[in-house]
Amino acid sequence: MKECIIRPIGIVKNKVDTEILKYANNDIELDPKRIKSSRHTFDTSEIIIYDEYLECLDGIEDFSHLMIIYWTHKTPVHARSIKKVHPAGLKSMPIKGVFATRSPVRPNPLALSSVRLLECKENILIVEGLDAINGSPVLDIKPHLPSYDSPLNVKIADWMYAIGEQFKELHENGKNKFNSAYPHTDMRSHPCISDEQKL
Amino acid sequence: MKECIIRPIGIVKNKVDTEILKYANNDIELDPKRIKSSRHTFDTSEIIIYDEYLECLDGIEDFSHLMIIYWTHKTPVHARSIKKVHPAGLKSMPIKGVFATRSPVRPNPLALSSVRLLECKENILIVEGLDAINGSPVLDIKPHLPSYDSPLNVKIADWMYAIGEQFKELHENGKNKFNSAYPHTDMRSHPCISDEQKL
């Protein structure tokens, strides 16, 4: 199979107009303004589902959390050839392959965000924690099932913890309510992290 | 944006040649042979990454778990118009919108599976728990980050628990080592499930 054709099933509406991480000079770049701004993606967003897919939502309110697959539409087409980046756009981090990062710049600019469903009003999902900017095309929505989607005894790269620390520092300097890229809990105290990596 | 063009970055190799859930008669159908077979998708799979994306893997071995986005390529194109299905293909379940299910039949047949990374040998990832059949095109690979991807205090639909029970029963009747669709732990005892829904 050479190509898959995907048609957006909806669009994100929120107050976030600029990307926190974006393509620049064959790498990704962190926007320090976004970190210090009170407008961040972990506020509430609306997902407007196009009318023809309205029926696909039936029963979705029985789940507290959803997984949203969306398109990082600001990634320029030529950036899809980038293979390695500085994780989180931090030049102090070792350069890594994009599949080892959550870079928005990747061969297929698909992004995945787990969100809390606050309300479903006809064709509008009101969600918390969507890490997408205003206007992002939404490609798929799935219920989040812990026993299927949240493996236990997980280990992550040491440099990923270092990013968490650096974001926390940037936040504290900005004296703002920035949630870090990891909104749900402290990285090392999460119940799914392996005992070896726990705090 | 009308369409997103995605090019597979790799392909799944395993011993599973038939889908456990497939399109049939405007709905999805469960293959009872697959449930009773010892060949199931929760065995080991290989993900063969195409040469041009080899560099994208650099650093991936620092993570124990990955999220694989793949294409359910056996879903016929006309089935993408299906809006509701019987969850897990079980006619005893109430019919639900596909966005409230993990049906392989959906407007954009994207699937998402969290896997354990056993080994990375050049362009081959050996993984455990990939819920895909042989030959599935792989579209993206991301590191699994519990604090970002595994929300806490999750509630899921009662009918989803009922599916888990029914799968367990089918397995016991089949007297085989079928893992159920939920390989990691019992659905209700998972640490991320809300206290209300815990066993």
Image (tube, coloured by chain):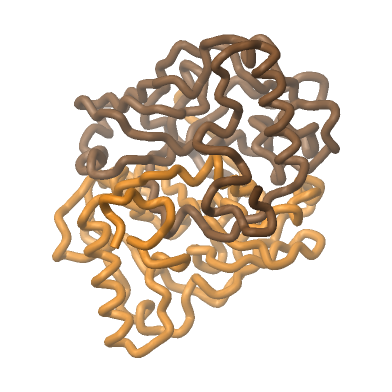
Chain colours: A brown, B orange
Q: Is residue A45 left or right of residue B84?
A: right
Say which of B97 and A147 sits in front.
Answer: A147
Examine the rendered structure and indicate whether residue B10 appears above or below residue A128: below
Examine the rendered structure and indicate whether residue B47 appears above or below residue A125: below
Residue A44, picture quadrant: top left
Q: Is residue B37 left or right of residue A93?
A: left
Say which of B37 and A43 sits in front.
Answer: A43
Residue B99, picture quadrant: top left
Q: How many marks?
A: 0
Q: Residue at x 55, y 24 (%)?
A: A179
Measured as percent of width and height from the top left, residue B130 is found at 53, 64
Q: Residue at x 45, y 29 (%)?
A: A129
Examine the rendered structure and indicate whether residue B87 appears above or below residue B41: above
Measured as percent of width and height from the top left, residue A86 is found at 80, 32
Q: Is residue A1 visible?
A: no
Q: Residue at x 69, y 61 (%)?
A: B48
Measured as percent of width and height from the top left, residue B101 is found at 31, 50
Q: Is residue B195 visible?
A: yes
Q: Residue at x 71, y 40 (%)?
A: A161
Instruction: Work out which residue is located at the far front of the displayed protein and give it.
Output: A199
Quadrant holding the C terminus of chain B: bottom left
Examine the rendered structure and indicate whether residue A191 appears above or below residue B17: above
